[in-house]
Image (spheres, helix red, strand yellow):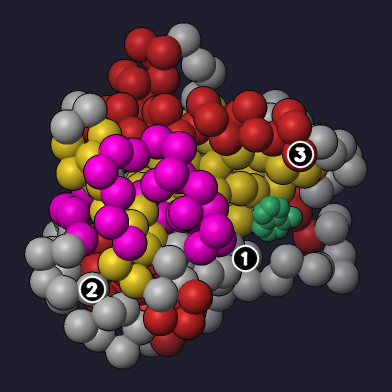
Amino acid sequence: MTPHNEAKVGDIAPNILLPGDPLRAKFIAENYLENVVQYNTVRGMLGFTGTYKGVPVSVQGTGMGIPSISIYVNELITTYGCKNLIRVGSAGAVHEDIHVRDIVLGTAASTTSGVNKDRFNGKDYAAVADFDLALAAHLAAEKLGYTLHKGPVLSSDLFYDDDPKFYEKWAKYGILGVEMEAAGLYTLALKYRVRALTLVTISDHIVTGESTTPEERQNTFTQMMEVALEALAS
Ligand code: ADE
């Protein structure tokens, strides 16, 4: 038990999916896992454990932003022994080659957050995905016949930014999309020597204003979940 999670040690699987939205965690557990048990309700941040093709898999809501995901991931790794962590979320595209409904694998995460500036006395830290987990996702997508875009993302502290033009510069330097958690997840996974990956579906295009319907989003979400689960089970 931790301040934010009432699960007992052993209740949470080493393989875990991390959506930001706790109701998304419930949806994933109900639709993709078998033999599901709910292990957490603290703060409404629902967590479940079940199996996927016989492999134990948990799914835990993390909330939005680096501070929130950092609390859950810290406890999942240090108290519950999670080893393979895949964030499954959404992002706004900024790059001209990325469009709504695309799936992006975040190979690295730059950030506007101050957390790593604080940690490293103002110096930069390169928060990167785990190569083996990224390779497993790449192979799973290839097998399923889904296109997976691979490249760096930006973990922003602001969802409602005053200046969308700010993101054009990031795109010029190769950033594919903007989300709010990957840099926190990758930093902690590297610190604790476990594996982490971020998969996101593109819900909007911050520069062009392109957007998608909830129905179309659901279809891409399904493809992303198949990639994430196959990567964990491989
Ligand atoms: N997730 C989805 N769209 C986003 C955006 N525009 N900014 C940050 N995170 C997002």
Of labels 3 and 2, earlier in sequence is: 2
**Residue 203 sits above or below residue 10 on the image:** above
Circle 1 packing at 10 Å, graded few (<14), some (14-19), many (20+), is many
Please count the marks in the image: 3
Give the numbered dot on residue 7. Answer: 2
Camera-near label (3 vs 1) is 3
Q: Is mark 1 within 8 Å of ligand 1?
A: yes
Residue linked to disc 3: 214
The residue singled out by tag 1 in the image is 156
Residue 219: x and y, percent? 63, 27
Location of residue 32 in the rendering, given as x and y in whole percent from the top left corner: 40, 36
Q: Determine the residue positioned at 52% across, 70% down.
A: 63
**Can residue 66 be seen?**
no
Quarter of the picture for ligand 1?
bottom right
Distance (Cα) linking label 3 and label 1: 23 Å
Under circle 1, the secondary element is loop
Q: Is residue 89 left or right of residue 157?
A: left
Helix, strand or loop under label 2: loop
Q: Residue at x 30, y 27 (%)?
A: 230
The kind of residue tagged 3 is: Pro
Along the line of sight, the residue nearer the viewer: 46 or 99: 46
Callout 1–callout 2 Cβ contact below 8 Å: no
On screen, residue 223 above or below 180: above
Q: Earlier in the sequence, mark 3 or mark 1?
A: 1
Q: Are marks 3 and 1 in contact (CB under 8 Å)?
A: no
Q: Which residues are magenta?
A: 12-38
Q: Is residue 54 magenta?
A: no
Label 1 sits on what residue type?
Ser
- Based on the displayed image, in which of its 4 quarters is residue 100 positioned? top right
